[in-house]
Amino acid sequence: MHNKKLQGKKILVTGGAGFIGSNLIERLLNEGGQVTCLDNLSTGFLRNIEGYMSHPMFSFVNGDIRDRQLCDDVCIGKDIVFHQAALGSVPRSVKSPLPTHDVNCTGFINMLQSATKAGVRRFVYASSSSVYGDHPTLPKVEENIGKHLSPYAITKYSNELNAAVFGKLYGIETIGLRYFNVFGKNQSPEGAYAAVIPKFIKAILGGELIEIHGDGMQSRDFTYIDNVLDVNILAATTTNQKAYDTVFNVAYGHHMQLIELLEMIEEKIVATRSNIRVVRTKHVPTRKGDIKHSFADVSKAINLLNYRPSVDVSEGLEKAIDLYCKAFAPSDAITSAVMPVDGIDIEGLI
């Protein structure tokens, strides 16, 4: 997918050293954009963007979205802002609600206000499928949400409300993207709040015991990174006014149980690596804030943004497994270590 509308545009990506942000930067540079990355490296990694440091159309600012003056400075002269920066993870927010609110809400308002003040035309921001809370209907439709189940979900919904108000009051064009369990290149398997797919792959390759929260029957709409990048580009370039000041589900539009996901990953790894033994699992209690089922209706993005999901879960897993197999290079030895697996984190970074 190539979009000439981005060529020469001055673009800011917050959280650009993270998983989705770094992939987005790569796509934007390939599209001919002039890209500035703002990241404080609290959850992102320099290694994700080090390949662009010498690129003539790229610049990096090490800073925090809670710094109001810095937000003003980095927004000056920008045409488009992609706001990916946030403190992610449902479990992290349950454990530490205050810093989650501080980064995700105060930081978001800082960026939104600075972008408005600087005359930025388009503000595309990351939201989350967690905003659907306990609403029972499947698939999830943008207009129908339930009671929120975590501080993280509340911060993301708050962002959506503020963005819509800013759009109507001040004229900045805002578009929110509710990500559903994104996976792919640059997604780290490390840390207590890492996402489930890289953790599964790493654990299988290392022969580690996998902990599954709950019965493993919870389902998710796992979404390969390329689909997410496509929607971001479409959101940044659309001229359909019906798409402004609203939100869109970003997913493939198909859901899978966690145990089915594990079986698929194991099957694909075993097919290419004969030294992998039987995967060992252990069920542990369900975590606070968990949503049982998450499955997206993507028809709104199809109709208003012309979105067409291009990579399904199977193909995406093959791409991800190939990358992780090269990165981890595990030994043949089977260890007895326990690898806790996070079954619902949306991105593992925001």
Image (cartoon, grey):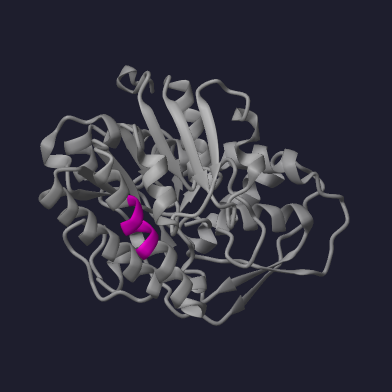
Quarter that holds the N terminus: top left
**276 to the left or right of 152:** right
Is residue 314 in sight in this rendering?
no
Where does the image place residue 4, in percent across and percent down from the top left? 33, 17
Where does the image place residue 123, in percent across and percent down from the top left? 28, 42
> Foreground: 246 or 181?
246
> Foreground: 323 or 115?
115
User: How many dots with numbers?
Assistant: 0
- At x 14%, y 33%, the residue is 240
**144 to the left or right of 59:** left
- At x 76%, y 42%, the residue is 273
Quarter-of-image position of residue 49: top right
Is residue 312 in sight in this rendering?
yes
Quarter-of-image position of residue 115: top left
**284 to the left or right of 331:** left
Where does the image place residue 322, in percent across and percent down from the top left? 66, 37
Find out whether residue 183 is within the magenta segment: no
> Foreground: 314 or 184?
184
> Foreground: 93 or 70?
70
Where does the image place residue 89, in percent across and percent down from the top left? 49, 65
What are the residue bounds of the magenta stretch? 106-111
Depicted 247 relative to depicted 289: above or below: above
Depicted 330 relative to depicted 79: above or below: below
Q: Main secondary structure of the magenta part?
A: helix
- At x 50%, y 23%, the residue is 57
- At x 57%, y 50%, the residue is 264
**350 to the left or right of 160:** right
Depicted 62 relative to depicted 24: above or below: below
